[in-house]
Amino acid sequence: MSPILVRPVREQLEHDRVIRLLQVRLKRRNEVAINIGEDQTVSVKIGTVQIYPDVVLTSADRGRKLLGTVEVETAESVNHLEAMAQWAHLGRARAPFHLYVPAGSVDSARRLAAENHVNVAEIWSFHTIGDQTRFTLVHKAPVATGRRPAAGVAAKAPARPSAGKAAGSAKARTPVARRAASGPAARKATVRAKAPARKAAPRVQKRK
């Protein structure tokens, strides 16, 4: 049971109204059970402590796996005692803990959550205009990112051969060049180049 046993009537009515609004809003994706006032319908056991959150979210299958817990606070119940007795325990559960506070109590809720090391997944503010209540997400715990998939890694360009490899390739081609240079055509060209040029024979003029 919450340490805030007695709220002002106006705050209690606002508290219960917000819980019913969340029940309608969240039941689209989950099974929703609520605890309003003195009614204790569903509990959550965390270690040896049994708590009755304002809203309990479970899966729709037979296992009824716990998917999340929600606490709705009023200006009166955003205090150090509530943070230690309720928020801290709900923050240690495996399921995410969501906290809803009045718009004017957001800073106090942040400070109390930090001071008491409360692992709160989301903090929402709510305020009422006329007969409408609006909810605003004011804090969301960061989600740890995994490694990037292999498909996202750019392919590396093939490395250019080093100078040593290039020299080795040149040496590998040298015997082929040598065999080509030692062929018959190459020997004939060499003989022609080395042979001295013949002098033309002088013409002999005939006497008339």
Image (cartoon, rainbow, N blue to C red):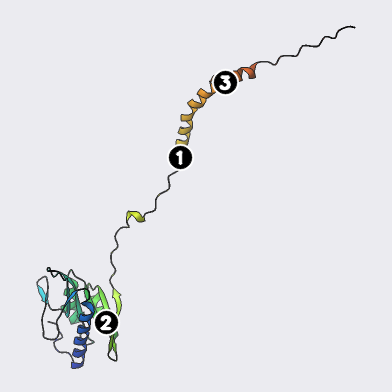
Mark 1 and mark 2 residues within 8 Å of each other at the beta carbon: no
Name the mark nearer the viewer: 1 or 3.
Answer: 3
Residue occupying the far left of the picture: 48
Q: Position of residue 140 (x, y in %)?
A: 29, 73
Looking at marks 1 and 2 on the same chain, the residue that comes earlier in the sequence is marked by 2
Three-letter code for the amino acid on which mark 2 is drawn: Ser
Please, what secondary structure does the residue beneath circle 2 have? Answer: helix
The nearer-to-camera label among 1 and 2 is 1
Image quadrant occupied by the C terminus:
top right
In the rendered image, the vertical position of residue 73 relative to residue 190, given as above or below: below
Q: Nearer the viewer, mark 3 or mark 2?
A: 3
Q: Which residue is drawn at 16% across and 78% down?
A: 86
Side of 155 relative to 134 (left or right): right
Q: Which mark is residue 185?
A: 3
Q: Mark 2 points at which residue?
A: 108
> Residue beneath label 1, please?
162
